[in-house]
């Protein structure tokens, strides 16, 4: 799959998830509030997305060709653009 094709696929996945879970900024804000309680310090929605990207990077360290993780990183990068506003 070309890079452009993968990015188009990632965009369609993000759009589908938006229909299911709502706007990324709102969804990541919910996770940030929960993680803030768990970790005992304020967590921002952008930090949530960065940690999710890092999780996928760790998984790619195990299997660098795992397409799902590559796709997820692209999707999370797009979400970071939205939550960072």
Image: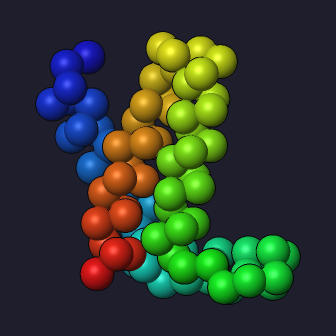
Give the camera-side residue of 1 and 36: 36
Q: Is residue 69 visible to us here?
A: yes
At 56% from the left and 45% from the top, the residue drawn is 54
Q: Would you say 36 lies left or right of 3 here?
A: right
In this rendering, the answer to whether 76 lies above or below 47 is: above
Give the camera-side residue of 27 and 61: 61
- Residue 68 x, y percent position in the rendering: 50, 30
Q: Is residue 15 visible to us here?
A: no
Residue farthest to the front, as pictured: 41
In this rendering, the answer to whether 57 lies above or below 3 is: below
At 21% from the left and 40% from the top, the residue drawn is 8
Q: Quadrant of residue 79?
A: bottom left
Q: Would you say 42 lies left or right of 77 here?
A: right
Give the camera-side residue of 15 and 52: 52
Which quadrant is home to the N terminus?
top left
- Residue 35 x, y percent position in the rendering: 73, 75
Give the camera-side residue of 77 and 5: 77
At 53% from the left and 68% from the top, the residue drawn is 47
Count numbered badges in the picture.
Answer: 0
Which quadrant is home to the C terminus?
bottom left
- The colour scheme used here is rainbow
Q: Would you say 76 lies left or right of 52 here?
A: left
At 50% from the left and 57% from the top, the residue drawn is 50
Residue farthest to the left, as pictured: 4
């Amino acid at each position: 799959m070309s890079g452009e094709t993968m990015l188009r696929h990632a965009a369609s996945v993000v759009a589908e998830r938006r229909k299911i879970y709502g706007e990324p900024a709102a969804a990541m804000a919910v996770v940030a509030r929960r993680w803030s309680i768990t970790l005992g310090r304020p967590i921002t929605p952008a930090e949530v997305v960065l940690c999710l990207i890092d999780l996928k990077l760790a998984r790619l360290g195990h299997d660098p060709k795992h397409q799902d993780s590559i796709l997820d990183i692209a999707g999370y990068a797009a979400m970071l653009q939205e939550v960072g506003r």
